[in-house]
């Protein structure tokens, strides 16, 4: 799944001239890969997002329904980790023993679905015809069931800076951020920096482009994540838009592929 499309959102806001008001969106996303584990895991998500804009401020909340099938050590939003929760996908409830360094326990697989983690953010953005920048504070509220392997059971907090620059019909964008992961009972998670960079060009009324994301490893046993995502986004009216994307992982910590579509309607 996408790590960040905040800068792209700034680009769309500038090209669509979004007015103050509320927006609601729904999407469908899927990804599949090993995430640094021995077997493949598939993650499907249907996020519902609501947001409100007033002047330079935007407040957003997103809550997904998630379905995961695969290794119990793969957690949505993190990827492959050492998850010592004895419950969850394919596990019996017996204590999990962390494997010795240099060894790997046999994968335990299963299927689970339910409500994912609630993500909320507040962005202050200054956008214009040529350039723009946005400052975002965000949080992940642990509403996902950690015993199903759908989350860590801990709240996370972060901040990001994203910007864009228009050069003719081409837009350059990117950003950097940092996430402080909450303390989980079963996963030793470390805070991580992340960054993204991309380019888009006008394609009729919409924009087509590519974005590259990077994130530090989040545990001592996981891999850093690098993803490339191609996308098409088209504003509809003054405050609505449609997005489609397809991604390819470029590291062991990433999914092999991802894809999705989203529709947002403004009021």
Image (cartoon, rainbow, N blue to C red):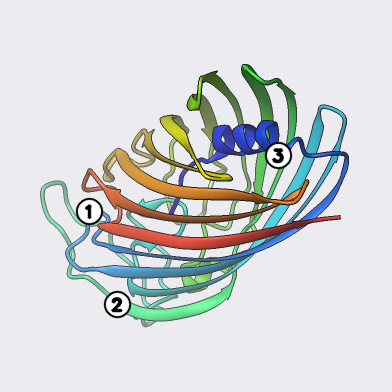
**Does 138 sit left or right of 247 as displayed?**
right
**In the picture, which quadrant includes the N terminus?**
bottom left
Q: Which mark is residue 109?
A: 2
Give me the residue at 36% from left, 33% from top: 216
Q: What crowding class fits label 2: few (fewer than 14 Cα within 10 Å), some (14-19), or many (20 or more)? A: some
Residue found at the far front of this picture: 204
Q: Which residue is mark 1?
A: 36
Q: Position of residue 115 (x, y in %)?
A: 62, 71
Question: Is disc 2 in contact with disc 3, using a CB cutoff of under 8 Å?
Answer: no
Q: Position of residue 62 (x, y in %)?
A: 68, 56
Name the N-terminal-most of marks 2 and 1: 1
Q: What crowding class fits label 1: few (fewer than 14 Cα within 10 Å), some (14-19), or many (20 or more)? A: many
Vertical arrangement, residue 154 with respect to residue 127, above or below: below
Question: Is disc 3 in contact with disc 1, using a CB cutoff of under 8 Å?
Answer: no
Q: Which residue is mark 3?
A: 16
- Label 3 vs label 1, nearer the camera: 3
Quick one: 185 or 258, which is closer to the camera? 258
Vertical arrangement, residue 261 with respect to residue 112, above or below: above
Vertical arrangement, residue 231 with respect to residue 159, above or below: below
Quick one: 45 or 36, which is closer to the camera? 45
- Distance from disc 3 to disc 1, alpha carbons, whole Å, reads 40 Å
- Helix, strand, or loop for circle 2? strand
- Helix, strand, or loop for circle 3? helix
Give me the residue at 21% from left, 48% from top: 252
Q: Position of residue 242 (x, y in %)?
A: 60, 56
Name the N-terminal-most of marks 3 and 1: 3
- Distance from disc 2 to disc 1, alpha carbons, whole Å, reads 15 Å
**Based on the displayed image, in which of its 4 quarters is residue 144 positioned?**
bottom right
């Amino acid at each position: 799944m996408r790590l960040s499309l905040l800068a792209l959102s700034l680009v769309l806001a500038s090209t669509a001239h979004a007015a103050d008001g509320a927006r609601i969106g729904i999407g469908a996303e899927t990804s599949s890969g090993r995430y640094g584990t021995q077997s493949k895991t598939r993650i499907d998500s249907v996020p519902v997002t609501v947001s409100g804009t007033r002047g330079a401020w935007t407040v957003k909340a997103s809550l997904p329904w998630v379905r995961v099938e695969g290794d119990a050590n793969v957690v949505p939003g993190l990827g492959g980790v050492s998850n010592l929760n004895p419950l969850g996908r394919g596990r019996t409830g017996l204590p999990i023993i962390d494997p010795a360094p240099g060894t790997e326990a046999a994968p335990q697989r299963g299927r689970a679905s339910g409500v994912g983690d609630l993500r909320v953010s507040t962005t202050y953005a200054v956008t214009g015809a040529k350039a723009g920048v946005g400052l975002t504070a965000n949080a992940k509220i642990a509403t996902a069931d950690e015993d199903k392997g759908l989350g860590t059971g801990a709240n996370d907090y972060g901040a990001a800076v994203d910007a864009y620059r228009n050069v003719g019909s081409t837009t350059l964008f990117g950003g950097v951020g940092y996430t402080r992961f909450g303390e989980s009972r079963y996963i030793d998670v470390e805070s991580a920096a992340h960054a993204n960079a991309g380019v888009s060009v006008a394609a009729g009324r919409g924009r087509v482009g590519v974005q590259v994301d990077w994130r530090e490893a989040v545990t001592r046993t996981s891999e850093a994540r690098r993803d490339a995502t191609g996308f098409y986004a088209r504003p509809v009216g003054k405050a609505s838009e449609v997005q489609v994307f397809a991604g390819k992982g470029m590291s062991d910590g990433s999914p092999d592929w991802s894809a999705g579509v989203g529709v947002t309607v403004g009021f």
